[in-house]
């Protein structure tokens, strides 16, 4: 029995020694916490504003996100006028709090109630998408009109239209009537893009049934912009004249060729459609990409929207597909994983045990955002309409699975209220570095704003892009631009979008990146959507700042003006002290971030490589060399993580610990038992036990996957340690069966 005790004790010692690094590293849980949210609706003066549709954009050019909302309306009764509201984000009432903000009603001054009939009775619209259509430096707004049933709708004379912004939030109709002249078009989504990369914003409009009762579809419409606020309908020339019942539209470059592709999220009577951009002004429908496989009569599943993001950080754009109905087909909202521009429906990656009715879904809206700024985008979904009022906040694990954390994040009061949640849109309303959430409801209940209280405990950066807005350069708002960050062994990629989804639930154009505990960005690269697809590169970029990057002119034989990158604010994470090894001083915030100064270019006689200069000034300027390198079709870099497995560093850690476990087991067994046979057997069992535990977790055995959905890669390492302990138990059982109670013989 003495040998049994020795075997067991030596196993515990071996596992404990190998587990120690994992326990030490697990002590820093900053990247793995779940953010909590607080309801700040009343203190931000939003109480009392109902919102059925929500779009978020910086309307007056001060960097702070403003709200354009539509209250619920009833087309059947004609209750459709004066439903729009513009709510501007202004300084709050607490002068002691640098992040105090509130919203004021700017609707009447804005001019958005104007109509082309020349009356004072308001105008009917249902969606709003923002872009700088005339390249003058401010965001203009396309207003789409929708009617649910033709047989009960009374034509008001209001149709799709476009308003130009004067830069202060005052809007006037464009002179052109190309949108208005299209007449009664049943639009359910609109997304801005520059599909031909000519530097002028274009518009893709998704249309639902022209007549639902008669099942009459209408084609979606592609408008080519000319950079002055005028547009031309090029649907036929682009070979897009296919009638379809779209309930949302999206744009994303899913094959990494630099040309944005088009995606139509279709109702249950037709398959969703993927249109690849050919780069010559035409599009080809991709019937074998898998994008629309589970949509249509066979599953009774309807697509409300496809929300693009490189959620698994493997260098290509994936989707989260938001679905309604599905009944008992088993089809439900889930990620679509991009593998060489073919989409795999990853139903198994979504776990939602608190679904009120898992056989009939009513998911209407969804949005990506990185709630805890760990570099892994999370997702929120709203469900309503079928006795299933619910929101689901999904947290992404290191293995790219999604688990509901609504209650843990403090958002359960919305579910407890049984209000019908319709919109859920992320925005950093106070510019403190983490993204907050604004909710609208399918009722006359007030909009709700929930502040993210802990996300900026991790590090972050917000990137604001400004295109050249002239021939040969990108559109002024940099829509379709791609920003890629390299932070140690990790790579994060985000694109600038404007209106993707169901009724254009637009988020701010500025891109928020979560960086975890990283204190420096090794490389920040911008791929500009200009004719040459040029790139711009920054190195050693400080974290916790709002960084404005201005597109550089194309390379010329003579020295050209350099780009200007302006950090508009530097912050310290509010929940932790500034890291001592930070490459730039990061004082505690004493004032909110200042608006970005109007960017200008400064001439440079001889461009020299440079990196961002450490500074704590509110609006310093960093001059960088012009780098215009045409980017070929991209593919994941060698060694990039393109599967659900952990990255190479995790493999290295596990292998290292397995080897260490074997070594310790062998040495302890040899020393205590004096025989190499049993030492080898003990070490071998330890190695096999740890390896099996790791493989079971990695390969996704259902009962074990649930354990890792909420965990970091260190959890996998720790589970490997437990597997090693089981290996020692196996060695003990083996020894007892073979040797009984006899001491092992020495060899």
Image: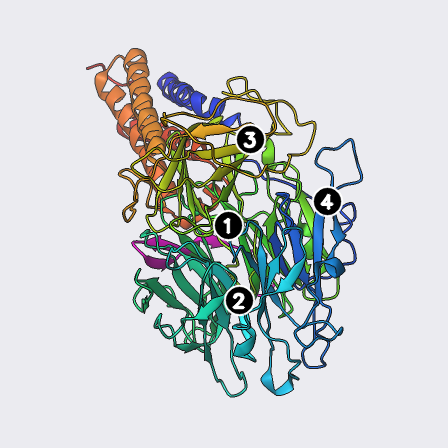
Checking the image for residue 90, the label placed there is: 4
Q: Are marks 3 and 4 in contact (CB under 8 Å)?
A: no
Foreground residue, 259 or 165? Answer: 165
| Residue 479 in view (yes/no) | yes
The CA span between labels 3 and 1 is: 23 Å
Question: What kind of element bears circle 4?
Answer: strand
Disc 1 marks which residue?
A: 477
| Residue 446 in view (yes/no) | no
Q: Earlier in the sequence, mark 2 or mark 3?
A: 2
> Which image quadrant: the C terminus?
top left
Disc 3 marks which residue?
A: 544
The CA span between labels 3 and 4 is: 22 Å
The CA span between labels 2 and 3 is: 34 Å
Which residue sits at x=54%, y=70%? 176
Q: Are marks 2 and 3 in contact (CB under 8 Å)?
A: no
Q: Which residues are magenta?
A: 336-357
Question: What kind of element bears circle 1?
Answer: loop
Disc 2 marks which residue?
A: 189
Foreground residue, 701 or 489? Answer: 489
The CA span between labels 1 and 2 is: 20 Å
Foreground residue, 210 or 385? Answer: 210
Residue 575: image x %, image y %? 64, 29
In this view, 200 is above or below 395: below
Report the mark closest to the observer, 1 or 2: 1
Q: Earlier in the sequence, mark 1 or mark 4?
A: 4
Question: What kind of element bears circle 3?
Answer: loop
The CA span between labels 1 and 4 is: 22 Å
Quadrant hosting residue 536? top left
Question: What kind of element bears circle 2?
Answer: strand
Which residue sits at x=69%, y=61%? 51
């Amino acid at each position: 029995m003495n040998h049994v005790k020795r075997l067991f004790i030596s196993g515990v010692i071996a596992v404990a020694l190998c587990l120690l690094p994992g326990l030490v590293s697990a002590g820093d849980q900053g990247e793995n916490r779940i953010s909590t949210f607080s309801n700040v609706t009343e203190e931000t003066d939003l109480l009392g504003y109902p919102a059925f549709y929500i779009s978020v954009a910086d309307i007056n050019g001060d960097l702070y996100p403003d709200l354009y909302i539509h209250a619920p309306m009833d087309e059947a009764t004609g209750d459709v006028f004066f439903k729009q509201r513009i709510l501007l984000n202004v300084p709050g009432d607490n002068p002691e709090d640098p992040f105090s903000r509130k919203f004021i009603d700017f609707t009447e001054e804005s001019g958005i109630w104007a109509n082309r009939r020349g009356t004072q009775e308001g105008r009917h619209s249902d969606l709003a998408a923002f872009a700088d259509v005339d390249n003058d430096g401010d965001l203009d707004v396309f207003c789409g009109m929708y009617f649910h049933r033709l047989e009960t709708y009374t034509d008001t004379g209001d149709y799709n239209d476009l308003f130009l912004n004067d830069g202060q939030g005052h809007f006037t109709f464009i002179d052109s009537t190309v949108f208005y002249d299209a007449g009664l078009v049943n639009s359910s989504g609109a997304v801005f893009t520059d599909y031909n990369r000519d530097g002028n914003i274009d518009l893709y409009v998704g249309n639902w049934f022209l007549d639902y009762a008669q099942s009459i579809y209408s084609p979606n419409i592609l408008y080519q912009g000319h950079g002055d606020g005028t547009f031309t309908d090029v649907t036929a020339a682009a070979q897009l004249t296919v009638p379809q019942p779209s309930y949302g539209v999206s744009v994303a470059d899913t094959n990494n060729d630099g040309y944005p592709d088009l995606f139509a999220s279709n109702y249950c009577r037709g398959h969703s459609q993927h249109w690849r951009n050919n780069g010559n002004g035409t599009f080809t429908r991709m019937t074998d990409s898998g994008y629309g496989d589970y949509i249509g009569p066979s599953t009774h599943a309807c697509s409300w929207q496809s929300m693009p993001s490189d959620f698994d950080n493997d260098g290509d754009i994936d989707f989260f597909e938001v679905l309604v109905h599905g009944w008992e087909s088993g089809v439900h909202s889930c990620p679509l994983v991009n593998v060489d521009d073919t989409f795999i429906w990853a139903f198994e990656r979504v776990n939602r045990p608190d679904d009120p009715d898992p056989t009939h879904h009513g998911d209407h809206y969804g949005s990506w955002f990185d709630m805890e700024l760990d570099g892994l985008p999370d997702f929120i979904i709203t469900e309503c309409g079928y006795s299933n009022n619910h929101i689901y906040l999904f947290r992404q694990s290191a293995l790219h699975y999604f688990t509901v954390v609504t209650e843990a994040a403090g958002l359960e009061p919305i579910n407890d209220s049984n209000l019908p949640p319709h919109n859920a849109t992320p925005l950093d309303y106070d510019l403190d570095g983490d993204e907050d959430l604004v909710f609208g409801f399918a009722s006359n209940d007030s909009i709700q704003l929930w502040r993210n209280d802990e996300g900026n405990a991790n590090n972050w950066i917000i990137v604001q892009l400004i295109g050249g807005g002239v021939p040969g350069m990108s559109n002024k708002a940099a829509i379709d631009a791609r920003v890629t960050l390299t932070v140690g062994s990790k790579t994060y990629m985000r694109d600038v979008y404007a209106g993707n989804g169901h009724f254009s639930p637009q988020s701010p154009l500025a891109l928020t990146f979560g960086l975890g505990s990283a204190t420096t960005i090794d490389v920040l690269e911008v791929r500009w959507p200009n004719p040459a697809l040029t790139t711009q590169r920054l190195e050693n970029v400080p974290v916790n700042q709002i960084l404005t990057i201005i597109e550089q002119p194309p390379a010329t034989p003579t020295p050209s003006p350099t780009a200007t990158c302006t950090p508009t604010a530097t912050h310290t994470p509010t929940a932790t002290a500034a890291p001592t090894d930070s490459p730039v001083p990061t004082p505690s915030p004493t004032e909110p971030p200042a608006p970005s100064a109007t960017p200008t270019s400064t001439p440079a006689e001889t461009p020299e490589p440079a990196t961002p200069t450490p500074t704590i000034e509110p609006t310093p300027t960093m001059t960088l060399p012009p780098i215009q390198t045409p980017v070929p079709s991209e593919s994941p870099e060698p060694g990039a993580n393109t599967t659900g497995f952990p990255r190479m560093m995790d493999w290295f850690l596990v292998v290292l610990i397995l080897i260490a476990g074997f070594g310790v087991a062998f040495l302890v067994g040899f020393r205590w038992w004096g025989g190499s046979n049993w030492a080898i057997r003990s070490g071998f069992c330890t190695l096999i036990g740890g390896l099996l535990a790791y493989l079971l977790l990695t390969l996704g055995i259902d009962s074990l996957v649930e354990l890792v959905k909420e965990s970091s890669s260190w959890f996998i390492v720790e589970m490997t340690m437990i597997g090693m302990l089981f290996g020692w138990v196996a060695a003990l059982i083996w020894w007892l069966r073979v040797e009984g109670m006899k001491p092992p013989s020495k060899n």
